[in-house]
Image (tube, rainbow, N blue to C red):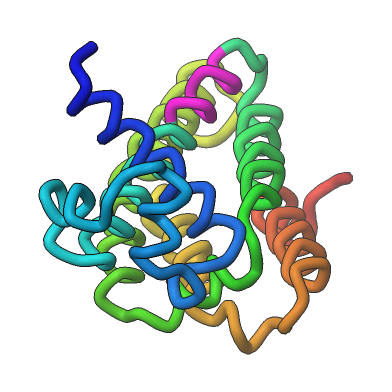
Amino acid sequence: MNQSKIKYNRLIEKAEELFVNLGYKAVSMDQIAEAAGISKMTIYRYFSSKEELFLKVLDLITARMFGYIEDNIKDIEGTLNKIDGLLKINIEQSRKYSLAFYKDVMEMPYILDKVMKEKKRMATILFEDIIREGMERGEIRQVDEGFVANVLISLMDGFARNFEEISNTKEDIEAFAEKFYDFLKYGLFGRK
């Protein structure tokens, strides 16, 4: 690996670490450069702005998370167990990020829309596959998997976009997410 690639990888690694722990607003390009052991000019050679760097980090986090979810639910048996596994992994993974990180994403409409668009694309693939497999196994009734995936994703999108109204603490948000996922899995009349 050449020196330029090493610097780039270190830049991405340190930028992600700082953004995840401190949020977007609290991190400066100077802090990122210092943490990565490179000059600020080197950062600007790769990215025209902090926002562009942040978007790259978010893209990498999202892709890594969905790869992790796919790897971890592929061997789970049963439709409900797969959905449960998917939702539990989502909660588990979300604990890695600071409240400041989430708030900063939610307060930046352009960033939020971009992130949600990619999450929707990837979640559609996951949910449609799970629903299709459930219908093939006779575990759930025949439905339009695209429609059901869109309903589930719309509910999750609404949750994400109303994030600040739910609470100001990470614990309250996690508790809300668990109740929300319980409702998604079992509805009003489902079994526990």
Tell me residue 171's x, y (percent). 82, 67
| 69 magenta-colored | yes
Above or below: residue 156 compared with residue 119: below
Q: Nearer the viewer, residue 137 or 86?
A: 86
From where the camera sits, is residue 140 visible? yes
Tell me residue 54's x, y (percent). 33, 59
Residue drawn 19% across the image and 48% down it: 42
Tell me residue 86's x, y (percent). 60, 36
Above or below: residue 174 compared with residue 68: below
Q: Nearer the viewer, residue 156 or 78?
A: 156
Q: Nearer the viewer, residue 44 or 137?
A: 44
Tell me residue 104's x, y (percent). 47, 75
From where the camera sits, is residue 148 visible? no
From this viewpoint, which residue is outermost toward the right? 192
Q: Which quarter of the picture shows residue 11?
A: top left
- Judge from the rendering whether residue 37 lies leftward or rightward of residue 68; answer left or right: left
Write down the region rendered in magenta: 67-74
Above or below: residue 144 compared with residue 4: below
The quadrant the N terminus occupies is: top left
- Judge from the rendering whether residue 15 lies leftward or rightward of residue 140; answer left or right: left
The quadrant the C terminus occupies is: top right
Residue drawn 65% across the image and 55% down it: 184
| 131 magenta-colored | no
From this viewpoint, which residue is outermost toward the bottom? 165
Residue drawn 53% across the image and 29% down it: 69
